[in-house]
Amino acid sequence: MQDEEVLAEFRASKALLEGHFLLSSGRHSAHYLQCARVLMDPARAARLTSALAQRIPREVRKEITKVVSPAMGGLIIGHEMGRALGVEAMFVERPTGTFELRRGFEFEPGDKVLMVEDIVTTGLSSREAIAAIEAAGGNVIAEAALVDRSAGSVDLGVPFFPLIAINFPTYAPDELPPELAATPAIKPGSRAKP
């Protein structure tokens, strides 16, 4: 799947938004990708996940024994990746602000994990989720995501395979351009800021 085809999927589902947005990372942007909208159509989710699975080198795909994603945003794409790879899909969640493996999920000795996210911007959530997976006994060998918003700068400590890199500018609160500063920020994501 080419980049323009991926963007067409986002546009067709009205998942590519424009305005003033406060991202989960705390940064601001004039663009927001609402992955929940692009993934709400099961056929579209399957197409995108199949394309994402193909971005992962074959030798890495063959090693993966579990897929883990963070709740909430990664649940659908993680589940679909488990289906695409033919392995179990689990998730970590933040019941008290820190990622944990719960609900009876556990790793077998030697499990090699693919961490799956919807969007990676700074990589903070990914690194926190990877740490939780490894603390629970999983060995994270790679991460895959629908979208890399990091401008190629993210370091997750494992190989990273995004479906598409979209480099909309993001801004720290004290760096806002006048057109963004003039309008209130909307926080459309699922994670509230503390």
Image (cartoon, grey):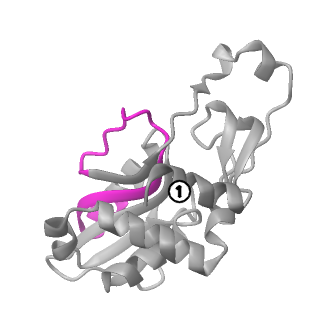
Residue visible at 65% across and 53% down in the picture: 191
Left or right, 85 with respect to 61, comes to right
Left or right, 111 with respect to 14, comes to left
Q: Amino acid at mark 1?
A: Val
Q: Is residue 29 above or below residue 114?
A: above
Residue visible at 67% across and 44% down in the picture: 32
User: In the rendered image, which quarter contains the C terminus?
Assistant: top right
Q: Position of residue 119 (x, y in %)?
A: 51, 51
- Whether residue 136 is in magenta: the answer is yes
Residue visible at 58% across and 52% down in the picture: 7
Residue 65, located in which quarter of the rendered image? Answer: bottom left
Q: Is residue 169 above or below residue 70?
A: above
Q: Position of residue 96 (x, y in %)?
A: 57, 60
- Residue 54 seen by the camera: yes
User: In the rendered image, which quarter contains the N terminus?
Assistant: bottom left
Left or right, 183 with respect to 4, comes to right
Q: Is residue 169 above or below residue 132?
A: above
Q: Position of residue 127 (x, y in %)?
A: 37, 49
The region drawn magenta spans: 132-159
Badge 1 element: helix
Residue 185, located in which quarter of the rendered image? Answer: top right
Q: Compare residues 68 and 13 and report the one nearer the observer.
A: 13
Q: How many marks?
A: 1
Left or right, 85 with respect to 171, comes to left
Label 1 packing within 10 angstroms: few (<14), some (14-19), many (20+): some
Residue visible at 22% across and 71% down in the picture: 61
- Residue 98 seen by the camera: no
Q: Is residue 160 above or below residue 169?
A: below
Looking at this view, name the residue that lies furthest to the right: 183
- Residue identified by numbered label 1: 6
